[in-house]
Image (cartoon, rainbow, N blue to C red):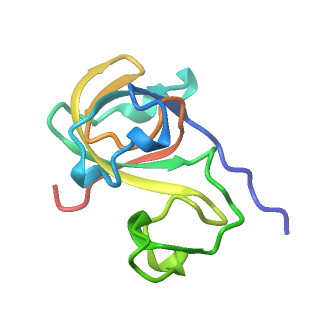
Amino acid sequence: MELPQLTIIGNVRGDILDLEDAPKNYSESDRVGILELVPEYEEGLEGITVGQLIVVLFWLHLADRTILKVHPRGDYSKPRRGVFSTRSPVRPNPIAISELKVLAIEGLRIKVSGLDVLDGTPIVDIKKKIGV
């Protein structure tokens, strides 16, 4: 059986340019950036509103996909654990998830706060936060 290909729906625009500058998690971030979608997905934005929380899935295109054990949160005083028991960006399929607050919407551009990924990171999907 042939599996469908992953489709990138857009990219992040922001001021996080290197890994050392990236917050460890969206819950620790007040960084603002733009989710810039590809024109063919504009219709999918209908229903997203300013003030809403959205869940965004990213493809961490620069992440190392060969590492299977890490020190949690990069803290070398903690023993190494399997990546599946952490939120480490290094993993076989480097998919990240962030919960972001919508600050503004202008066409294909969604201004958000809570950004924790690098400028240029591909966007895989956007979902409404459950319970909101």
The quadrant holding residue 13 is top left
Q: Residue furthest right?
A: 1
What quarter of the picture does the C terminus occupy?
Answer: bottom left
| Residue at figure coordinates x 50%, y 47% from the top left | 58
Q: Residue furthest top?
A: 106
Q: How many marks?
A: 0
What quarter of the picture does the N terminus occupy?
Answer: bottom right
In the image, 132: left or right of 74?
A: left
Q: Is residue 103 above or below residue 27?
A: above
- Residue 124 x/y as whole percent: 54, 45
- Residue 95 x/y as whole percent: 54, 56
- Residue 111 x/y as whole percent: 29, 26
- Residue 100 x/y as whole percent: 27, 44
Q: Is residue 38 above or below residue 107?
A: below
Q: Nearer the viewer, residue 74 or 47?
A: 74
Q: Residue furthest front?
A: 77
| Residue at figure coordinates x 43%, y 64% from the top left | 74
Q: Nearer the viewer, residue 68 or 101?
A: 68
Q: Is residue 46 above or below residue 79?
A: above
| Residue at figure coordinates x 18%, y 31% from the top left | 50
Q: Nearer the viewer, residue 16 or 105?
A: 16
In the image, 62: left or right of 56?
A: right
